[in-house]
Image (tube, rainbow, N blue to C red):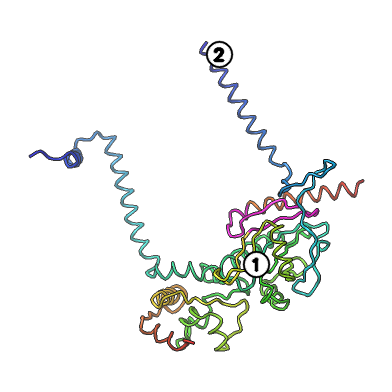
Amino acid sequence: MKLLSEKGSIFIFCMLFFQILGCQSNQEAPLPILGIPEIQKNGDTLFHTIPEFSLVDQDSNKVTNSTFKNKVYVADFFFTSCPSICPIMTRQMKRIYEQFEHENKLMFLSHSIDTRHDSVPVLKAYADRLNINHDKWRFVTGDKSEIYALANDYFNVAYEDEDAPGGYDHSGKLILVDSQGHIRSFCDGTDPESVDEFMKDIAQLLNEEKKRQNQLTHQ
Amino acid sequence: MKPNRGSSIVRAGWKSTYELPPGLNRIKITFGSIFALFFIFFLFDGCTGPFTQGKALYEANCSRCHGSDGQGFENLYPGIRESPYLHEKNLNLACVIVYGSTFLDQNSHKSADPLMPENKHLTSVEVLNIVNYLSWEFGKQTQHTIESVMRNLEKCEP
């Protein structure tokens, strides 16, 4: 009787062990599409997608959705004279940039929320001082209301606030967008550990996109 | 007189030092060594820096841009170590801390963009703490007094 129960417990342990193993191998599940999906009348699901936008970058180039065609990009919201969280966010963005420097499928998009001060030359000086490839990392300005509305679509908050340091209040999230304009991951740009996890998600999404494009070319 | 309970336990604790079995004595030795380690740690901890208040203020107000190590970041935020304001005696570091770019532009030292913000919320004692910490950590380790900082701040008052 006692022997049986011992065997039984070993069996249960084994089951648990394999279940844990099974869970671990399941980790390569695709990243979720974030945001609230819309169910259309015909029953199709419409996932949250970044809307059409038209902005201007540090080299006076027009930046639209098609700039990121077949690319994955990391987006954030900042302003150059921001004394509070931006310096930390920019450091973390640069860390991600360096990690994926030779990955030509990945781009970066930093929106200025201080459209009054951050003109094209100011953004250009900022980008120059950051020592980055201007094609890969776009610093954009544009119509203030358009950028503030876009911030909401990227799950960020941005508004003018006299009491906030620097005059603007905004969240420090970094957002990962896939080639379809869907948001697949985000992190707290002021927390290096959160950014570490985020970089794993970027690598995973890049793999997924490569597989997708291989499938498309084989069809 | 009836001794209270707490003190009797303490006394028993002291007395029992010699009565403990060998196994428990070893435990006591380990406690002793842990205590000694803590003591040594506190001794060395005192050596890490005398300007702890200045360091805390620097971490809270300056390190986001200039870095905890004073190295700055790319060409965006200049490092503290190589700043002339730390190494040349006649330059006014206190005013840079309090007035930021407004002061730097007036002295046409370098048109800083991104702008260095003002730190008018700092009191002159806090500015003194930061100045002393900076010169101890990154500079020539010259000591400043509250009089010299206040004199310097008066010079750049708008």
Q: Reply above or below: B95 against A214.
A: below
Quarter of the image with the N terminus of chain B in it: top left
In the picture as drawn, the residue positioned furthest to the top comes out as A1
- The picture places residue A46, in percent across and down from the top left corner, at 79, 47
- The picture places residue B80, in percent across and down from the top left corner, at 52, 75
- The picture places residue B64, in percent across and down from the top left corner, at 54, 67
* Residue under pointer 1: A78
Mark 2 falls on what kind of element?
A: helix
Task: Tell me which segment is drawn in magenta.
Answer: A173-196
Residue A93 versus residue A173: which sits nearer the camera? A173
In the picture as drawn, the residue positioned furthest to the front comes out as A41
Residue B140 versus residue A24: which sits nearer the camera? A24
Q: CA distance from mark 2 to mark 1?
A: 65 Å
Q: Reply above or below: B101 against A93.
A: below
Residue B24 versus residue B4: which sits nearer the camera? B4
Q: Reply above or below: B141 against A146.
A: below
* Residue under pointer 2: A4
